[in-house]
Amino acid sequence: MLKNQKGFTVLEILIAFVVAVVAIVGIYTSVLYAEAQLKRNHHHRAAILLASGECDKQIYYLKSYGVLQQFAEKTVTIEKYDDGSYLNGKMYLTSHTETDYSFGSGVEYLIIEIKVEWTEGEDEILDIVVREDFYH
């Protein structure tokens, strides 16, 4: 009968449509993942900068006044959003003295650790720790 018909069957169109939908969903998922990872990396960088600044401040207090400005826990703002809300975290300070015997005699030094902890998304708790060794 009609052997030389040209065109697409319904099955071929359906398969092409499914492939296109899967590709679009894959691209959309990748974009959402990349955006979430970008936010997470930004929050890590902000927390590291907060902790590093606090370390510098503590060393300044130690050099200037001979003591650390101790605190058990302090609330810090990691990011302020356009809608006026904040991503807040908690900052913790720990310090202790150790002795370094690398060169035969003991040299005391102070270890300052600043930890910043925050909740990413609904329930994922993330943290970073910055450590500074201060030889005095």
Image: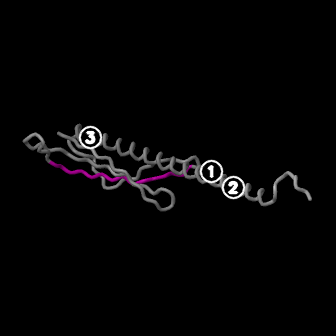
Q: What residue type is labelled 1?
A: Ile
- Classify mark 1: residues with Cα within 10 Å, few (<14), some (14-19) or many (20+): few
In the image, 41 versus 1, the foreground residue is: 1
Residue 11: percent from left, percent from top: 78, 60
Residue 61: which quarter of the image?
Answer: top left
Residue count near mark 2 (Cα–Cα under 10 Å), binned few <14, some 14–19, many ≥20: few
Of the two numbered discs 3 and 2 on the same chain, state the one appearing first in sequence. Answer: 2
Quarter of the rendering occupied by the N terminus:
bottom right
Kindly check if marks 3 and 2 are in contact, taking CB atoms under 8 A apart as contact: no
Which tag is nearer the camera, tag 1 or tag 3?
A: 1
Label 1 close to label 3 by CB (< 8 Å) = no
Toward the viewer: 2 or 12? 2
Amino acid carrying mark 2 in the image: Val
Magenta stretch, main secondary structure, is: strand
| Disc 3 element | helix
The disc, 1 or 2, on the residue closer to the chain's N-terminal end is 2
Give the residue pinned by disc 1: 27
**Res. 59 mark:** 3
Q: For this rendering, which residue is in front, 81 or 10?
A: 10
Q: Name the residue under label 2.
A: 19
Q: Is residue 52 above or below residue 91?
A: above
Q: Does the magenta stretch include residue 85?
A: yes
The answer for how far apart the CA atoms under marks 1 and 2 are is 12 Å
Residue 117 highlighted magenta (yes or no): no
Q: Dividing the image into 4 quarters, which one contains the C terminus?
A: top left
* Residue at position x 31%, y 40% in the image: 56
What range of the chain is rendered magenta?
84-98
Q: Which residue lies furthest to the bottom in this view?
A: 123
Q: Nearer the viewer, mark 3 or mark 2?
A: 2
Judging from the image, what secondary structure is the residue with disc 1 in?
Answer: helix
- Tell me which residue sits at (87%, 52%) in the image: 4
